Image (tube, helix red, strand yellow):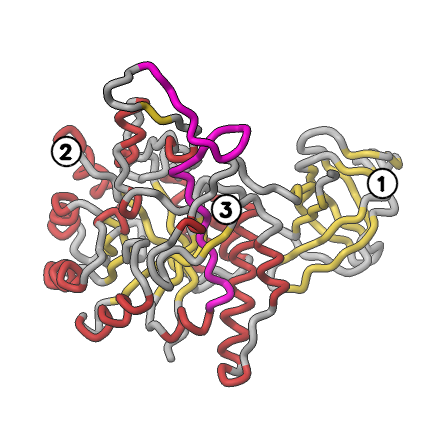
Amino acid sequence: MKRPELLAPGGSLTKLKTAIDYGADAVYIGGEAFSLRAAAENFSRADMEEGLKYAHDRGKKVYLTANIIPHNADVDEFEKFVDEIKDMGFDAVLIADLGLFDIMREKAPEIPIHISTQANNVNYRSAIAWHKMGAKRVVLGREMSFKEIAEFQKRIPQDLELEAFIHGAMCISYSGRCLLSSYMTGRDSNMGACAHPCRWNYKLVEETRPGEYMDVFENERGTFIFNSKDLCMIRHIPELIQSGIASFKIEGRVKTEYYVATVVGAYRREIDRYFENPEEYFFDEAEYEELCKVSHRAYSTGFYFGKPNADGQVYTSSSYIRNYDLIGIVEGYDAETGTARVTQRNRFFKGDTVEIMQPKKPCFTQKIDSITDENGQEIEVANHAEQRVFIRTQKPVSKGAMLRKLRAE
């Protein structure tokens, strides 16, 4: 069995570094144009250069997403974009459109091309066609089951890689090709500006009774009939690995660095544990609990074990489940005093019980017995945004470690 790539979202330079520090083998990022996550911070040229160096210095890869569905006005701009990035050292570019694919092949034939999930690859013939034109990898549509993936593997060339989403938000439309947002708000999903109307509250109107809005009761807040659960496959690492998928992809370029660290860390640990002893591997339920500590909707296994039934949707609310808050990030550690320098992200108090997670080390829990400000004064609460404080930790911590605490009910 070949060890799969763990591919993480990089919505910003900080998130790229976080993903790599916490165990990602590769990161996908977007530039300031042509990426389907306009809401992400995205990367300037200087950020791209720094991110590429950070990744490559550590033996990791960076993929550039350029997977919009372009109109005529975008074509000339994309050619200029390719000229700007072709010599930067990207390990691949993700494309969804045949025209942009053609431009990439003409202007930067040395850069591998991965076919985005936006191209709706759900049958092996389309994958083979992309491969014949020069694609190295195809990102499968989220609508694929393990049974269908097995059929893919029998039919496609051995040197064509498959990539599949294993965690994150699901779209109600085929692999994200959604027209609702554009129709209802003028914000085009296929150009990266989705307004997420699938999460809204809806009522029913009968054709001959315009203006008569009938409730479709789910709860007192309304009905959320398009609102899909999030994908989570961490309990199924053996099936994923045995499927032969080359790259396990985590969704979430607009999510926080805390989300990236937590999700990447959990999957990294489980994948590594599996390869340590595949015959005796068993899932550590603590890792699922870890994934429940980030902002998420209820989890499901998507289409992997067949088409989702009624359990694949969330009917009660469009809100996220948020049980924990990130309260600080460690910027440095003094081994002599056992003191960590922390940048505050959410308010916390002396006496709080916190969990401290850090790259490639076990998480531990402790009580904060003191907080000192930058002037050396003892304080009771760190309540200023980005406030730098010092706390004693029961164990050594590394730069980039994150402090979180359970939300009060």
In the image, which residues are magenta?
211-236
Disc with the residue nearer the chain's start (1 vs 3): 3
Q: Nearer the viewer, residue 32 or 57?
A: 32
Q: Mark 2: which secondary structure?
A: helix
**Residue in view at x 81 percent, y 38 percent:** 349
- The part of the image, by quadrant, that contains residue 180 is top left
| Kind of residue at badge 3 | Lys
Residue 401: image location, x then y, percent? 66, 52
Disc with the residue nearer the chain's start (2 vs 3): 3
Mark 1 vs mark 2, foreground winner is: 1
Residue topped by disc 1: 350
| Distance of label 1 from label 3 (alpha carbons) | 29 Å
Residue 316: image location, x then y, percent? 52, 38
Q: Which corner quadrant holds the N terminus?
A: bottom left
Vertical arrangement, residue 333 with respect to residue 223, above or below: below
Crowd band around label 1 with a 10 angstrom C-alpha radius: few (<14), some (14–19), many (20+): some
Q: Mark 3: which secondary structure?
A: helix
Q: Residue furthest bottom?
A: 279
Q: Which corner quadrant holds the C terminus?
A: top right
Left or right: 138 with respect to 255? left
Q: Which mark is residue 15?
A: 3
Residue 22: image location, x then y, percent? 55, 58
**Residue in view at x 45 percent, y 47 percent:** 229
